[in-house]
Amino acid sequence: MSYNRYGISPENALSRAIELQGIDKSDAALSTLHEVLSSRRKSNWSPTYEKIMITYIDLCLTLNKPREAKDGLHQYRNLTQTQAPGSLENVIKYLVEQSEMRCKEAKEKIESEEAETKADVPNMENDLDASGDDVPTLDLDSNNMLLLSTMTADPAQNQKESMLLLPKIKFLWETYRAVLDILKSNSNLEALYHATTIRALEFCGAYKRRSEFRRLCDLVRTHLQNLQKYGGIAAMARVTDGGKPNNKIRGWEGWTTESIELQLQIRFKQLEIASTLHLYTEGFKTVEDIFNILQISHSRRKVAGGSGAPKAKIMATYYEKLTTLFWVSDNHLFHAFAWYKYYTLCKEFNRGMTAEQKSLQASAVLLSALCIPSVPASATSDDGSSKIKSTEQDNFDREKTGRMATLLGFHTRNPTREALLSEIRAKHVMDDVPDYLRELYTVLEQDSNPLNLVEKAKPLLDRLRSEAGSDGEGALSAYVQPLINVLLLKLMHSLSASYHNISLDHIKNLTSGLEVPFAQVEKAIISAASRKTGKSLSVRIDHRANCLRFGDHNGGAQLESDHMRSQLTVLAKQLSKVCNVISPQDTTADEAARKAMYIDVRAVVDQEHGEMIARKELIEQRKEEAERKLQEQAKEEQKKKAEAQARARAEEERRLAREQLLREKEKEEKVRKEMELSEKKNYLTAMGRNVDAMTENELSVVDVDALAREHRNKLAKKKDDAERKVKETQKKLDYAVRATRIEEKPMIQKKH
């Protein structure tokens, strides 16, 4: 029954719904409240509507109807968005909190029942052993249990989750989606949008909802794209000038510093949950979103009155999240660069940073850089053969790496291990690193003797493992295993430069100090040999001969290898250095020539300096002239554009005036025709004709003047006929009176 159809007030509808709920008619109560919320007669908000909405939400939660809850929330949004946004915020908070609480209660109930079941199983076994009788098994719908047992190890647990937990999870997920859709462009409730998004992300992480996490990321990404497209600086400027805002961003007031920070915090949480769920593709998409948000901030700084760059604390948090993402995705290169950016930001802006924290972060930067797999310079030739071996896949990977470096805000588009280590040395990061890590750096980067390489590195790795464990910092101890892999890679390359064949027993002796199984050593060898770049290690494991064979083993192709091609070149360079040490050349003539050259340079340096300054001034003048011309050209174009707009406006005004005049003429003509038609009808009616039986075409061909003349003629004829009849009547009467008097005259005379 529809109550609002008869004008029932919100107060009466609320009382009626409570009565229906009390007699177990929740569906009827929900329908009553929904009709009140969706009624078009409601105009002004009142606190009663908030009470109605709270009761409506409780009914939706009880009946598990997420679609009705979403519809009611949209109706309430339309009512309160402009009149009472605070009430909308309270209702949304209540809906989210109640949905989360019921979902949590369902999960706790399942966990408690599972714990009781696990506790009852040993008791049943003990009773069975004590009595020696058979205990009847529980009848848990054997057909369903048999079906579920093919999909899960615990069918009873899966059935409980399907009945109790999954409906609550679905309701909570639909609640998050509805709330985010309502708040996606509401600047007044932007903090609530941020809090709801964070809650939704935490929900996906807590319940391991991977598909929902992907859909949530796509949803907030769509919201961001709409705000970028329709709510940017240019779009909002058009709205300020009098244009209409797009419906997709209704309620949006433009980007502010707070909105940018809230959007960044949402993406940081996305990075964290993506790392937890091992969804690295979503993590990299989130990095692109963060780059777009930073571009928005950069665009705002170009506008007059725009705020500064994002706070260093926010960017430090960003790079800290990236270290975790790249570490769990085994991307050691970007993991190291993220650590370096995080360290530089903390060192520059964190005034309260202690020496211990600085040492820990510097150690993490160095160790993460050392963990990047690399090939020693001696393992490659300088004859350009590696460039020849470059493939399209290498170019694609290089472009992909450069694009990712740009998105992350790194200082180079070609991030490499060597570039990062060079930056570490240039920025004196090594000064904050403990001494034993410097020794480890020396072993991995400078020492090349394969016979004592492991012997030197073993105590340093053991110390790293022990000190990281004793300090309670597990971050540094995680680098031990990657460092061992890098050490094995360096060992193999060093051995390949000195040996053609080496026994596996000797390899085992060399790597025994690392305390790793030989299977891991073999895995490192195969990984180094199967690299797709031109710097891969050429090695074979010959288990039949129990040895390693380095170099190409294709017959005569061994002499054509890159390493063999550069042997004579390397020998010549080394012999030249030895000769210069044994018998140094006489450099007196060279020094004299050099001094003379310096004298000539000093003589012309002032002149060249002046010419350079003059050239610089000339370049500046030309730049200023070019800028002035561009400005004049822009002003001229703007002037022409303004004149064209003025002409267009004048032409538009003239067109409107012509149309107005034409409309007035058409109106006058229409009135004239109507008056003429009315006059025709009056004439025809007066002439005794049936106007209703005549068509419009017949009426249109009738001449008004002819009708008027005909009407006048008829009137004149009628008048003449009337006058003639009067005269005839008068004459007849006159004759009758005269005859009567003539006849009565003798009678009167005779009488008198």
Image (cartoon, grey):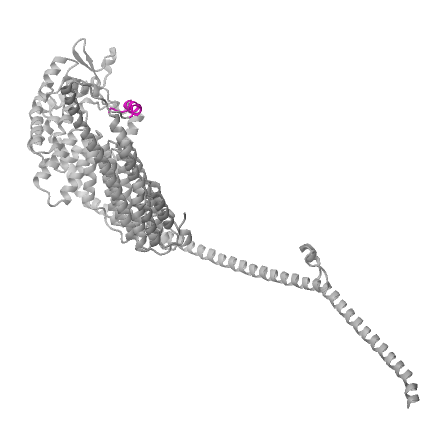
Relative to the observer, which residue lies in front, 677 or 389?
677
Q: In this view, does 685 lie above or below 506?
A: below
Quadrant position of residue 739: bottom right
Q: Check residue 145 for magenta coloring.
A: yes
As drawn, is 640 to the left or to the right of 731?
left
Rendering coords of residue 360 (x, y %): 10, 36
Q: Where, by quadrant of the figure, is residue 356 drawn? A: top left
Residue 142 within the magenta-colored segment of the rendering:
yes
Residue furthest top in the image = 544
Quadrant of the image occupied by residue 104: top left
**392 to the left or right of 548:** right
Q: Is residue 451 above or below residue 305?
A: above
The quadrant of the image that shows the C terminus is: bottom right
Judge whether residue 184 can be spotted in this image: no
Residue 688 appears in the rendering: yes
Main SS, magenta residues: helix
Q: Residue 392: percent from the left, percent from the top? A: 31, 26
Disc tally is 0
In the image, taking residue 497 as reference, residue 292 lies left or right, namely right
- Magenta region: which residues? 141-153
Q: Position of residue 374 (x, y in %)?
A: 19, 26
Q: Residue at x 25, y 22 (%)?
A: 534
Q: In the rendered view, tell whether residue 292 sits above or below residue 416.
A: below
Furthest residue toward bottom: 752
Residue 556 placement (x, y as % from top left) = 25, 11
Nearest the eye: 1 or 35: 1
Residue placed most toward the observer, 444 or 509: 509
Q: Residue at x 25, y 40 (%)?
A: 102
